[in-house]
Image (cartoon, helix red, strand yellow):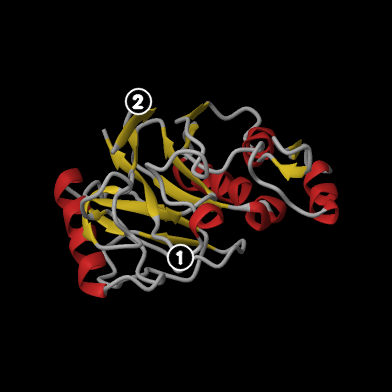
Amino acid sequence: MLHHDLSPGARAVFTTRAGGVSGSPYAASGGGGGFNLGRHVGDEPAAVDENRRRLERMLGVTVEWMDQVHGRDLCVITEPTGRHAAATADALVIGPGVPRIAPGVLVADCVPVVLATESGSHRAAVHVGRKGMMLGILGAAVERLGELAREAVFAVAGPHICGRCYEVSAELFAEADALGAGSTTRWGTPGVDLLAGIRRQLDGVPFAVVPGCTLEDERFYSYRRDGRTGRCAGVAVVA
């Protein structure tokens, strides 16, 4: 797992493919069990459940997940739901007074963005793909977190497909370019730079990036590279 300071009161955690029990095609890139955390990708449910339990034991928290749909809906919870998915949403906010619950986001090329207030009392996990970026899901989450806590908000983005690898049609490029997220791929074709779009939407928010292109780096799951594959996670926990 990859760790990064998120705010003075919180830290960001991003998983890789290694360390779990999932078999092929969800296995770790170097062999061994894969750490797939997605229940919707065709993996054995028992394997996914064990991977999720392992993650919670390592972090010492209960992780709440979403049924992600590339939309703009946001969910706020203040107690454990006991469900595989807390809600159908693309941003999940936790707090206050529940440090042992952590919001999680699942990705396989999209950007996992985790947010926290300065104290860590409120934390969020946001699923930012091309559609979510266009719809402004990240800005909505930052705004909601600030309203709930009335503290400064901090952000960290985890490994995702980079602008040199995210090839799209000319039409989708034009839409992204209007938001400052257009790019040219390493093949000289139109692309989308999700990180550039996120930087613009987080203007004024302290922001860090955990590097890694999911398509190029086989430590991570990538739908664009592999098709049938698992999901890595981003989680925001109290420091």
> Residue 67: x percent and y percent?
45, 69
Q: Of marks 1 and 2, which one's residue comes earlier in the chain? A: 2
The correct choice, above or below, for 230 with respect to 17 in the image is below
> Residue 133: x percent and y percent?
66, 50
Q: Which mark is residue 228?
A: 1
Amino acid beneath label 2? Pro
The correct choice, above or below, for 40 with respect to 55 in the image is below
Q: Which mark is residue 68?
A: none
Q: Split into 4 quadrants, where in the image is the N terminus?
A: top left
In the image, what residue occupies the spot 62% across and 27% down? 204
- Side (left or right) of 116 relative to 53: right
Near-viewer residue (210 or 144): 210
Place residue 198 in its image quadrant: top right
Amino acid beneath label 1? Arg
Q: Which residue is mark 2?
A: 8
Label 1, label 2: how many angstroms apart (C-alpha)?
Answer: 38 Å
Place residue 197 in its image quadrant: top right
> Residue 217: x percent and y percent?
45, 38
